[in-house]
Image (cartoon, rainbow, N blue to C red):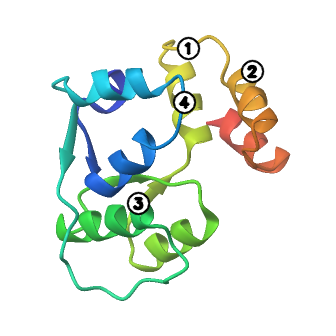
Amino acid sequence: MLPALFGKVVITQAVADECLRGQSADILLIEQALTSEWLQCVDNPDFKHPLSRSLGLGEQSSIKYALQTNGNALLILDDPLARKQALRKQLLVVGTAAVLFAAQRKTLIPDAEALIAELRQMGYRISDAVIAQLKKG
């Protein structure tokens, strides 16, 4: 779905490390994606930019990478503090739910709301108002 929406996707090493940590059944899928042409893993930026220390390494490195591209990157962030920091830096930000609705509009998935409901059962938080706004397009 991501390559069909965005072509190439770039993640930092910190994001890759977070995704590959633990015992998730998705680890194999992530490892396969990392060997594909559409997903590129880059080194964590050394870019000195003050960000909240409350952010995880993945969020910090992603925001710093986007800043290195002079804002020519679209960040997919769900963490409210990370989104706030990125928007303060005038970066482009969307959340997982927006990506799912974009995929539904391109008929890549049949029902974004059903997937969001599954994510909510796993602890993903998003308001009904945001979902209603995303449904409008």
Three-letter amino acid code of the residue under disc 3: Gly
Residue for badge 1 = 109
Mark with earlier residue (3, 1)? 3
The residue under label 3 is 58
Front-most of residues 82 and 20: 20
Instruction: Kindly indicate whether the residue at mark 1 contacts the one at mark 3 (C-beta within 8 angstroms).
Output: no
Q: Amino acid at mark 4?
A: Ser
Farthest front residue? 23
* In this view, 112 is above or below 62: above
Secondary element at tag 3: helix
Check the image and report above or below for 102 versus 87.
above
Crowdedness near tag 4: few (<14), some (14–19) or many (≥20) residues, C-alpha within 10 Å: few
Rounded to the nearest whole Å, what is the CA distance between mark 3 and mark 1?
A: 27 Å
Q: Quadrant of residue 1?
A: top left
**Residue ID for mark 2:** 114
Q: Which dot, 3 or 4, sits closer to the camera?
A: 4
Q: Residue at x 48, y 67 (%)?
A: 56
Q: Nearer the viewer, mark 2 or mark 3?
A: 3
